[in-house]
Amino acid sequence: MDVRTFEDPGELAAGAADLIASVLTRSEGRVDVGLAGGSTPQPTYTELRKRRVDWSLVDIWLSDERWVPHDSEDSNGHRAERSLVEHIPDARFLRPRFSEHLEPEDSAAYYEAALRSVIVERPRLVLLGMGTDGHVASLFPATQAVDDEPGNRWYVANQVPQLDTWRLTATPHLLEIAEAIVVIVSGSAKADVLAESIERPAGRHPIEILHRAQGEVTVLCDRAASSSLSS
C-alpha cells in the first residue's frame, strides 16, 4: 500500500487528478474507472476534467450509490455528473437504475450485469473515499455486505441501519480483484482511523479490506488526514 501526502486539499485534488489521468492514458483500448461518492472526491473530479484524456475510450461507473432518485441532491451519480460527466460528453457513464417499482437488490443486480458487460475480467481503476468510521464505498461497519461477503458478486444492495437507509455498493470481492485502487482521504477527523487501518489493522474498519487487494492500492491524503501516521 502506497501512501502519498499532500499539503492541503487543493494539492490533494490536483495530485489525485494527475494520478487518475495517468492510469487512464497509459491503458490500451477501452478503460473503466469507478468513481467514489461523497464530498471529498468532488474537487478531484473538477480537476480531472481539465486533464488531457481520450474520454471516448472511458467507461465510468460508481463504486457506490445511495438508494434515492437519480436527480436527488444526495445521489452520488447526480453529483458525479455535475462535477465531471457533463463536462466530458465523450465518456460512457453507467448509471444505476432507481425506481419505486424496484427493490434495492434488483437494482444492484441490474447494475452488476451492466458492469460485467463492459469490464472483461476485473476493474482497471476504482476510486474510493473513506468515512470517519472507516467505511469505503458503502461498505459500512457491521453491515451484511461486509460481514457476509457475497461470494463472487460484484455489486449488492446493503442495508445500513446506522443511517436508516439502503445503499448500492461494490463488494469486497470486486475491490480485491481491481487492478488499481486510489483512496482519497481529507481532514483531521479521519486521521486516527486512517493510521490504525494502515499501520495497525485489527479488523475494525472496512477499509482494511484493501490489505487483501490483488492490485495496486494508493492512498492519497492531505496533511491533516495523515497527521496520525507514524511516518
Image (cartoon, rainbow, N blue to C red):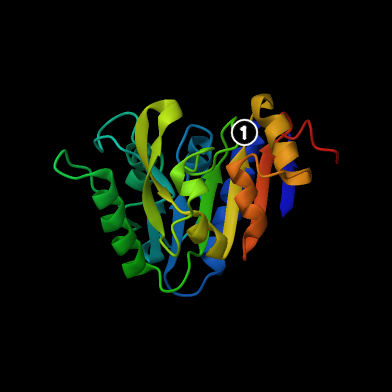
Q: Is residue 208 visible?
A: yes
Residue placed farthest to the front in the image?
148
Q: Position of residue 58 (x, y in %)?
A: 40, 62
Residue that appears at 56% across and 66% down? 179
Q: Quadrant of residue 55?
A: bottom left
Say which quarter of the image contains residue 114. bottom left
User: Looking at this view, is 111 or 173 the one in front?
Assistant: 173
Quarter of the picture holding the C terminus: top right
The N terminus is located in which quarter?
bottom right
Would you name the residue on which mark 1 appears?
Answer: 10
Query: What residue do we see at 53% from left, 70% from top?
Result: 27
Q: Is residue 53 above or below residue 35?
A: below
Q: Is residue 5 left or right of residue 64?
A: right
Looking at the rendering, which quadrant does residue 99 occupy?
top left
Please indicate, yes or no, whether residue 50 appears anywhere in the rendered image: no
Q: Residues within 10 Å of mark 1 (few under 14, many from 20)?
A: some
The amino acid type of the residue labelled 1 equals: Gly
Residue 35 in the image: state x and y as whole percent.
45, 48
Given residues 37 and 45, the one toward you in this image is 37
